[in-house]
Amino acid sequence: MKYVFKEFRRHLGRTVASISGYIIATMFIILIITITRNNEKDTSNILKGTGTHFIIYIPSGVPYNNVPFEAACCLEPEFCTSASTEKVSVKNFKNGSLYSDGVYTKLLSRNFLNQIKQVKGVKDASPYLLYKKYEEKYNAEITIGGMEPNSIATNNNVCAPNDIIEGKFLPSDTSEIVAEEAFARSFDLHLGDTINYCNKKLKLVGIINSGVKPGKADLYSRFENLKYILKDQLKLNMSGFDLNVILVEVEDSRNQIEVMNAIKLQNQYASLSSYNCYKPAANVMSIIGKASAISYGIIFLFLIIFAAKTQTTSLMERLREIGILKSLGWSNRRLGRQIIAGSMIQALTGIIIGSALAYVVLLLLKYFKIQLIDTSMVSIHWSQMFFVCALSLAGGLIASLFPIFRIYKLRAADIMKNYL
Amino acid sequence: MNSPIIESISLSKYYTGRSQTIKAVDDVSLSINRNEFILIKGRSGSGKSTLISLLSGLDKPTHGKVLIENENIENLSNQVLSKLLANKIGIIFQNFNLLPTYSVFENIDIALNPGSNHREQIIMPLLEQLELKDKVNFLPYELSLGQQQKVAIARTLAKDPSIIFADEPTGSVDDETAKEIIQHLLFLKNEKKVTLIVTSHGSSFDDYADRIVFMQAGKINSGLL
C-alpha cells in the first residue's frame, strides 16, 4: 500500500487529474440523475393520473353473474326484457331509466363492485347511479347522477369539489341538488331556484363545470340521496343491487389496459367506457422511462470509458516499471492488487468529493429555490447518491480490469524489450 | 559431480518480422552447474540478452525448454515463477533498471518480499558493503553510473539469490567500478556459493569465469575454459 501512495505522490499531476475526473463524473452523474429523476417523477405524477379512469356498466339484455335476468334488473319490464346481447338503443326516457353511454343498463351488485376493487392496479372504485328521465316542464331528457363524493374515482369520472363554480358541492340534504353549468344556463337556473324532477322539488345549491367526463350528468346528488329521490322510480328490491355504473380509477395509466382486460375476463358482458387518454400518457411515460434508462446507461458507459482510459494511460506510463517489478519477482496478482488498490483509492476519493460537491450544488438549488425545467424543487435522494457512488466504484473496478488483463498477458522481457 | 542447476534444451527464440524471421536464440542446449561461473560472450546482437531472458524465465521460448533445478519453468504458474524470481533468481541489467523516482533504499526495498521483516537490517549492511550508505535517500539520477549499478547489485543481493544473471554488468561503468563489480560477483560465487551467468562483449570477466560460452547469430559456438 505504501507504494500505491508513493505512486500517487510520484505522479501528483496525473493523480489529481484522475481524481478530478472522478469528481466531475460523479458530480455530474448525481446532478443529472437527480434532476432527470425529479423531472421524471413530476411528469410521471402528471401523466400517471392522465386518463386513468373509466366506467363499467352492463347494458340491458345481457346475462349477469348467473343471476336471473328479472332478479338482476329492477327497472320497468319494457326496458329490461331484451334478450339481445347488443346494446339497446334508447328510444325515449319518458318513464325514466338507469342508463349509461346512451343505453339502458342493468343494476349491478356491491359484490361486483368489491371484485373490481380487488383487481390488481385498481386504485379506487366507486358506485354510481345514473338515471335519465324526460321532464315535461323542461321538455328535455334530464340526467341525474348519484355519487359518493369523497372518492378519487368519482372525482375523475364525474365531478370534483374543485369543479364548483357557484354554491356548494353535493349537499347532504336530500332536497338539494347541484347542476352542470351548461344545463343551468340552458334553463336559466340560478342558485336557490327549484327544479322539478321525478315529482320532487329540488333546490339548486351549486353549479358545477365538470368538463368532459364519462359519467357526466345534468344534475348531481349524493348516492344515498339519489336513491331517496328515485325511490318511486327504482325497484331496489334485490339486496346489494343498488348501482348501475362503477367508476374506476387506475393507479398508473401504463397499467390501464391490463386492468381493463382483467375486468373483461371477470365479466365478459361488462361494458368499459374510457376516453382513452391513458394511451398517449402511457406512451409518453414509457418514452420518458426508456430515455432515462438509456441516459443512465450512457452515463455509466462514459464513466467506465473515462476510468478505463485513465487507468490505461496510467499503465502505459508505468509499463517500464511494471516490467522491472515483474523481473524482481512481483507476481501478476500482486501487481493487479496494486492497480486495483490505486484505482479504488482514486475512485473513492473522487466519488466522496464529487458526491459532496453535488450535494452542495443540490442544497444551493433548494436553498435558492431554483426550479429546473419547470418541475418542482429538486429533492436529494440518498439512495440515488449511494447508487451513483456504487456505480462509480464499479466503474473504477471494471476500468482497472483492462490494465490488469494487459499485465497478465505481457511478459517481463516483452515489456522491457519494448518499453525500456 | 555437480548437478546442473540450470539446463536449456534446444532453446530457441524467434521473432517474426514483416519479411523475415529473426532467430535471436537458435537451438541452444546448455547445462550450468551449481556454483558455476559461466560467461556468455558475443558481439552485440548475438542473442546473449535474449538467452539470459529465456534462462531466467523473463521470456518464453519459441521452442525448447529451460529446467531450473529439474523443473521446466514453462510449466510453472505465474505465481510460482514469480516466487522463483523473487527468492532464487537475481538479475542485474546493463542499464540497471532502477525506478527513477524511488530512492536508493526504496529501489532495494521493492525487491524484498512484501512480508519480509527487518527490511532495514537487510538493506543497510548491503549499502555499507557497496559504499552507498550515505546515498540511501538519493534518487538514481543523483548517482553516478557505477553507483547506480551498485544499487542494482544491492537490489539483487537483498534477495539472497542462489542464481544471478548479470547482463553486461560492467558495460556502462568505468574500469575501476567494473573491477569492483567483478570482485563483488566473485565474492558471491566464492562465499555465498552463488551460480553466476554473466554476459559480456568485452574481456573483463575472462580470467574469472569457470567456463566461457561464445554466441554468434543466436547459436553457441564452443567453450571451455
Image (spheres, rainbow, N blue to C red):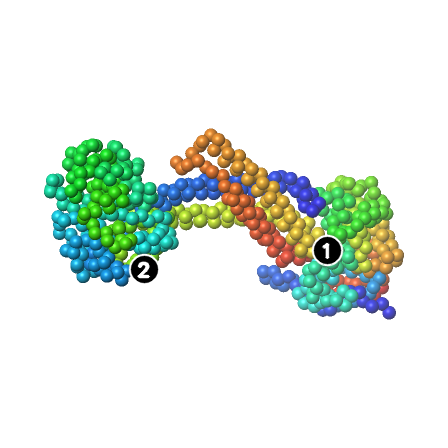
The residue under label 2 is which amino acid type? Leu
Q: Position of residue A327 (x, y in %)?
A: 72, 55
Disc assigned to residue A229:
none
Snapshot quadrant of residue A330:
bottom right
Q: Label 2, secondary structure: give it.
A: helix
In-front residue for pair A194/A379: A194
Mark 1 or mark 2: whose residue is earlier in sequence: 2
Badge 2 is on which residue?
Answer: A265
* Residue B123 relative to residue A289: left or right: right
- Residue at x-position 18% and y-position 33%: A193
Snapshot quadrant of residue A216:
top left
Q: Work out whether disc 1 and disc 2 sit on a shared chain.
A: yes
- Residue at x-position 27% and y-position 56%: A270
Badge 1 is on which residue?
Answer: A329
- Residue at x-position 67% and y-position 40%: A9
- Residue A323 lies, with reference to residue A356, above or below; the image says below
Instruction: Work out which residue is located at the far right of the displayed protein and give it.
Output: B191
Residue B74 seen in the current view = yes
